[in-house]
Every structure is written in structure tokens, then in C-alpha cells.
Image: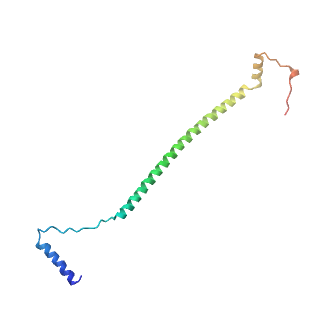
Amino acid sequence: MSNLAMKLEQQRQEQIKHNPRQEPIIIKRRASITPGEKFLILVFVSLFVIGAIAIVSNSYSLYQSNIEIQKIEAQIDKQTKLNSDLHVQVEELSTYDRIWEKAKELGLTLDQNNVKSVQK
């Protein structure tokens, strides 16, 4: 510091020492975060929150879709089993002996002259 600056500093200190009743000097400091920085932080936090909400909502909808897929697959398995059981039942009911017994119960007879054979 130059001599003049030193003298001014000493005078200031002396004035403070001589007037203890005088109110303390309030030094105004500039805010450490500027309004522009506050705005940028607000934008960043807002984008972060919006992104987090979007990820959570997408995960939830994916979860719901998976549940529906599993339910539909269970229904498909159930229907496939039912179809298989019905196919076995059709095979059992369409045997030649059973058809012949039903025909006899209904009073039908086999006429050998009327029978046509089919060859593959």
C-alpha cells in the first residue's frame, strides 16, 4: 500500500478506537449467489424433478403392462389346456365302436350292400 492509503487506514482505526459509542461500521457484502445463478439452479432442479417424475411414471406404466401380459398369458394357457382336453374328448367320443353302439341304440342297421369303402 502507498503511504496515503496507510495514513487513511490508520485514521479510520483511530476514529474507531476514539469513538467506542459510535455504531459499528456495517459492511455490505454482495450475495454469494447471483440472481442468474439462482435462476439456473431453479431450472436445473425443475428439470431434474420433471425427469424423475417421467421415469417413475414410465416405470409404473411398464409394470402395469407386464401385469396385464402375465394375466393374458395365464388365460391363454388355461384356454390351451381346455382346448387340449376337448380334443381328447372328441377323440374318445368319435371311436368307431362308440358310433356303432349309438347307431344300434337309435335303431340303425348296417347294410353291407350300401357300404362304400374309401381308399387313400
Q: Is residue 118 left or right of residue 65?
A: right
Q: List x then y, in percent, for residue 43.
A: 41, 59
Q: List x then y, in percent, for residue 45.
A: 40, 57
* Residue at 14%, 76% in the rendered image: 14
* Residue at 47%, 48% in the rendered image: 57
Q: Quadrant of the C terminus?
A: top right
Q: List x then y, in percent, for residue 3.
A: 20, 84
The single residue placed furthest to the bottom in the displayed view is 3
Residue 51, quarter of the rendered image: bottom left
Q: Quadrant of the N terminus?
A: bottom left
Residue 17, quarter of the rendered image: bottom left
Q: Is residue 74 left or right of residue 39?
A: right
| Residue 2 sits above or below residue 23 on the image | below
Q: Is residue 11 left or right of residue 51?
A: left
Question: 28 or 112, which lies in front?
Answer: 28
Question: 66 or 10, which lies in front?
Answer: 10
